[in-house]
Image (cartoon, helix red, strand yellow):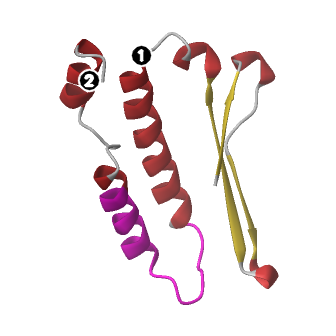
Amino acid sequence: MSYSCLPDEYGRNSSVRHVKAERVISFDLTVSEDRYKTWSVSKQRHALSHAFYTFLGEKMKKYKIEHLDTEEFTSDMGIWLKEIGWMQTEEEAELGEKYGL
């Protein structure tokens, strides 16, 4: 998984590359630098975590990966993101912004 935070003028979109023969899937999530640079860290974390989780979940549904339960994988990723302090609610992100967290 890679992230790109680029100016809107670049016109770069998020993408997925699946090489079945090599059993590799790569995700490249691109977000708007123009939008993110004006936000607090708390708001950036909130938006990026939800964008990542949504992107991952939608894209994983499109691929059949041998020996991988994609629903379970996506669910586990959501749990892990919450454990590391991502996937906050909007209210939690606003509190973080208010108190500089």
Label 1 residue SS: loop
Task: Report which residue position mark 1 lands on.
Answer: 40
Residue 12 at what x, y percent from top left? 75, 32
Q: Check the image and name the residue furthest to the bottom.
A: 67
Quadrant of the rendered image containing residue 73: bottom left
The structure residue drawn at horizontal position 27% and vertical position 27%, both measured from the top left corner, is 93
Q: Which numbered disc, 1 or 2, marks the residue that appears first in the sequence?
A: 1
61 up-or-down from 67: above or below: above
User: What label sits on residue 49 in the rendered view?
Assistant: none
Kind of residue at badge 1: Ser
User: Magenta includes 21?
Assistant: no
Separation of residues labelled 1 and 2 (CA atoms): 9 Å
- Horizontally, residue 71 falls left or right of residue 31, namely left
Number of marks present in the image shown: 2
The structure residue drawn at horizontal position 43% and vertical position 22%, both measured from the top left corner, is 41
58 up-or-down from 67: above or below: above
State yes or no: discs 1 and 2 in contact (Cβ < 8 Å).
yes
Label 2: few (<14), some (14–19) or many (≥20) C-alpha neighbours in 10 Å? some
The structure residue drawn at horizontal position 81% and vertical position 84%, both measured from the top left corner, is 21
Residue 92 at what x, y percent from top left? 21, 30
Question: Which contiguous range is marked in magenta?
Answer: 62-80
Quadrant of the rendered image containing residue 63: bottom right
User: What label sits on residue 96 in the rendered view?
Assistant: 2
Say which of 54 and 45 sits in front: 45
Label 2 residue SS: helix
